[in-house]
Image (tube, rainbow, N blue to C red):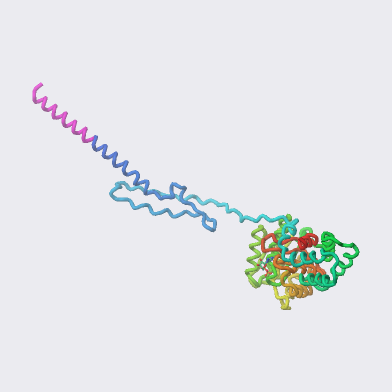
Amino acid sequence: MSSTVIVVLVVVLVVVALAVVTGVVLARRRRIDLTERRPAVEEGRPAGYQAGGGIALTPGGERAVEAPPEPAAPDEDEFDVEIEIEVEPLPAEPVEVAPPAVDEIAPTSGRLEKLRGRLSRSRSALGQGLLGLLGAGDLDEDSWTEVEDTLLLADLGAATTAEVVERLRAELVARGVRTPEQARTLLREVLVEALHPDMDRAVRALPHGTQPAVVLVAGVNGTGKTTTTGKLARVLIADGRSVVLAAADTFRAAAADQLQTWAERVGAEVVRGREGADPAAVAFDAVKRGAEAGVDAVLVDTAGRLHTKTGLMDELGKVKRVVEKRAKVDEVLLVLDATTGQNGLTQARVFADVVDVTGIVLTKLDGTAKGGIVFQVQRELGVPVKLVGLGEGADDLAPFEPGAFVDALLG
Ligand code: GDP
C-alpha cells in the first residue's frame, strides 16, 4: 500500500469518527430538551382536570362546570411546541336532590306524664299549698279560708272553688282523714272529679269515607294558635294519620310562612293563598286538596283576631260555613293562653257565640302558677280541654288527661 492510500484512509477514518461523535452529542441534547419540557406541560393543565373536571352543585341543584383556572402562562423560552388541552364539560345528567329531612316525632301517649315537670309552678302554688293544709289533720275555719284562697289564686274560679271546698269538708269528716297520705288520696279524687273525667277528649280527626276530617283552629293572635296547629299536625302524624294544613290566616304572611315550616318539618302539604286572600276560600281549597290527596285530616289555622272586632269574628263563622259546603267540620278547637286568666275566659265566651267550640287547647301552662284555669274554662264553656301546651318545643303539646294532670299538680 502506498503512503498516499494510507493517508487517505486515515483522513476518512477521522472524518467518520468525528461524524459519529457529533451525532451522539446532538442526540443526547435532544433527549435532555424533551425530558425538561414535560413538567412544563403538566403544570399547564387546569387543576380540576385530573380531579374529575371540577363539577359542583349550584344551590338550585343544577349541574355546573367550574370555570377552569387560567393555566399558568407558559415560559416562551421553555416551549418550542404548542400543546392545546381541551377540557370537555361532563354531559348533563339528572341530579338526585335529597328530600328535606323530616323530624322524628315524640310518641303522643304518656306525654303529659313526661312533661309533668313543666307544671312545677302550679304544683308549688296549688298542689303543695293544699297538701300542706289538708295533711295537717283537723282544719279550723282559718285553714279552710286558706284552702279557698289557694284555689282562687290558682284560677279555679269561684264556682269550682266553692264546690271543691264543700266536697273536701264533707269527705274529710266522713272518711275520718288523719294522715297526709289519706289527705292526698282524697284531694286527688276531688280534683279529678271536678275536671269531669268522663268528657270526651278525643280530637275528632278521623276521615269520613273519602272525606278528610276538618279541624278549625281558632284563637286570638299570640295565644299560640299557629304553633298549636303545627304541633297538632305532629301529634296526628305520630299517630299514623296524614294531614294537609291550611294557612287561612291570610292577614299575616308570617303566619303562613310559620305554618309552612311546621308542615315541611313533618313532610305535610300546606295550602296557602295570597296575602289578603279570602280566608274562607283558602280553607275551602285546602279541604278540596285534602280530599283529592286522600288525607285523614285537614287542619285549618284561621286568622287570629281580636275578639272585640265584630267583623273579624263574623269572618270566622263564614270560614266554617264555606268549608261546610264541601265537608263536615269535625272540630273547632279554641286556643287559649293559660297565662291570661280572666281575659282568656272573656275571649272564650265571644268565640263560643260565633262558632260551636268543640274543644279547648290551653297553651303556656308551663309559664303559669295558675293551672287551675283548666277547671274554670271547662266549667264556663261546658267544653272539654282536649290538649295542653307545655312549652315551646315542637312536641310540647299533650293530650289532656285529668288524672295525670292532677298527679302532676300534687307531685
Ligand atoms: P298565634 O299568633 O296565636 O298564632 O301564636 P303563635 O303560634 O305564633 O305563638 C305565639 C308564641 O307563643 C310563640 O312564641 C310560641 O312559641 C309561644 N307558645 C305557643 N304555645 C306555647 C306553650 O305551650 N308554652 C310556651 N311557653 N310558649 C308557647
Q: Quadrant of the N terminus?
A: top left
Residue 344 location (% of width, % of height): 74, 73
**Within the displayed image, which quadrant is ligand 1 positioned in?**
bottom right
Vertical placement of 314 versus 362: above or below?
Answer: below
Magenta-tinted stretch: 1-23
Give the residue at the far right of this rendering. Answer: 174
In the image, residue 8 lies in the stretch drawn in magenta: yes
User: Where on the picture, by quarter, is residue 359?
Assistant: bottom right
User: Residue at image x 84%, y 64%?
Assistant: 137
Name the one closer to the observer, 379 or 80.
Answer: 379
In the image, taking residue 275 as reference, residue 139 lies left or right, namely right
User: Where on the picture, by quarter, is residue 32?
Assistant: top left
How many dots with numbers?
0
Name the one closer to the observer, 55 or 122.
Answer: 122
Name the one closer to the observer, 128 or 335.
Answer: 128
Vertical placement of 88 versus 228: above or below?
Answer: above
Vertical placement of 340 versus 245: above or below?
Answer: below
Most frequent secondary structure within the magenta stretch:
helix
Residue 150 visible within the image: yes
Residue 266 location (% of width, % of height): 66, 58
Name the one closer to the observer, 247 or 273.
Answer: 247
